[in-house]
C-alpha cells in the first residue's frame, strides 16, 4: 500500500533568489516562463504553501510560480505585529487551520 504524502510549507524560503533557489538539488531547470522552475517534492501527492506578504524569509511568497506540484498557494497576513516569520503566527492563522483541519478530524 502506498501512503500519500501531504506537505505544508509555512513562510518557506525555497524560492529565495541567490540564497536558496539556485542551490536546490535537483537544480531548477529552464521553463517556458521568464524564470527557472524547481521540481516538486518527490513522492508528494499534495503540497500547500502559505506565506505572509510581509515575511522577509518567504520571498517571493508565491512558490507556485517557481515550483511544480503546488496544489494550493496562499498569501495571507498571519501577523500585524512585525513577527511575520514566527511559527506560532502561522499556526494560529485561519488559512493554516482550514488547510490542516481535514487531516485532524476536526
Image (cartoon, rainbow, N blue to C red):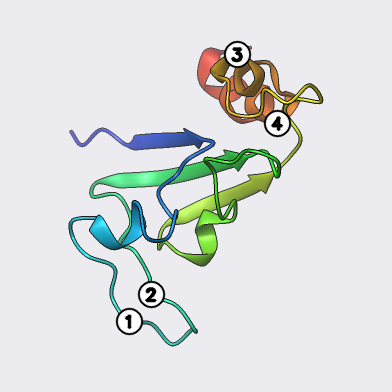
Between disc 1 and disc 4, the foreground one is 1
Tag count: 4
Q: Is residue 54 left or right of residue 80?
A: left
Nearest to the observer: residue 37 or residue 84: 84
- Tell whether label 1 touches label 2 (CB within 8 Å): yes
Q: Earlier in the sequence, mark 1 or mark 3?
A: 1
Could you tell me which secondary element the residue under label 4 belongs to?
helix
At label 1, counting other C-alpha atoms closer than 10 Å, the crowd grade (few under 14, some 14-19, many 20 or more) is few
Residue at 60 percent of width and 13 percent of height: 88
Could you tell me which secondary element the residue under label 1 belongs to?
loop
Q: CA distance from mark 2 to mark 1?
A: 5 Å
Residue 59 percent location from the top left of the image: 55, 51
Nearest to the observer: residue 9 or residue 5: 9
Give the residue furthest to the right: 80
Q: Quadrant of residue 31?
A: bottom left
Q: Which residue is mark 2?
A: 36
At label 4, counting other C-alpha atoms closer than 10 Å, the crowd grade (few under 14, some 14-19, many 20 or more) is some
Q: Which residue is mark 3?
A: 88
Residue at 68 percent of width and 16 percent of height: 92
Q: Earlier in the sequence, mark 2 or mark 3?
A: 2
- Quadrant in which the C terminus is drawn: top right
Q: CA distance from mark 1 to mark 3?
A: 36 Å
Could you tell me which secondary element the residue under label 3 belongs to?
helix
User: In the image, which disc is placed on residue 30?
Assistant: 1
- Tell whether label 3 touches label 4 (CB within 8 Å): no
Q: Earlier in the sequence, mark 2 or mark 1?
A: 1
Residue 66 percent location from the top left of the image: 46, 64
Q: CA distance from mark 1 to mark 4?
A: 32 Å
Q: Which residue is mark 4?
A: 95
Q: Quadrant of residue 35?
A: bottom left
Q: Earlier in the sequence, mark 4 or mark 3?
A: 3
Amino acid at each position: 500500500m502506498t501512503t500519500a504524502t501531504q506537505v505544508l510549507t509555512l513562510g518557506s524560503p525555497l524560492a529565495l533568489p541567490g540564497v536558496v533557489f539556485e542551490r536546490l538539488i535537483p537544480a531548477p531547470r529552464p521553463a517556458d516562463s521568464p524564470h527557472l522552475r524547481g521540481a516538486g517534492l518527490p513522492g508528494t501527492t499534495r503540497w500547500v504553501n502559505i506565506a505572509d506578504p510581509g515575511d522577509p524569509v518567504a520571498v517571493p511568497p508565491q512558490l507556485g510560480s517557481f515550483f511544480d506540484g503546488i496544489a494550493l498557494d496562499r498569501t495571507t497576513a498571519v501577523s500585524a505585529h512585525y513577527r511575520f516569520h514566527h511559527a506560532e503566527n502561522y499556526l494560529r492563522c485561519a488559512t493554516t487551520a482550514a488547510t490542516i483541519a481535514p487531516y485532524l478530524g476536526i
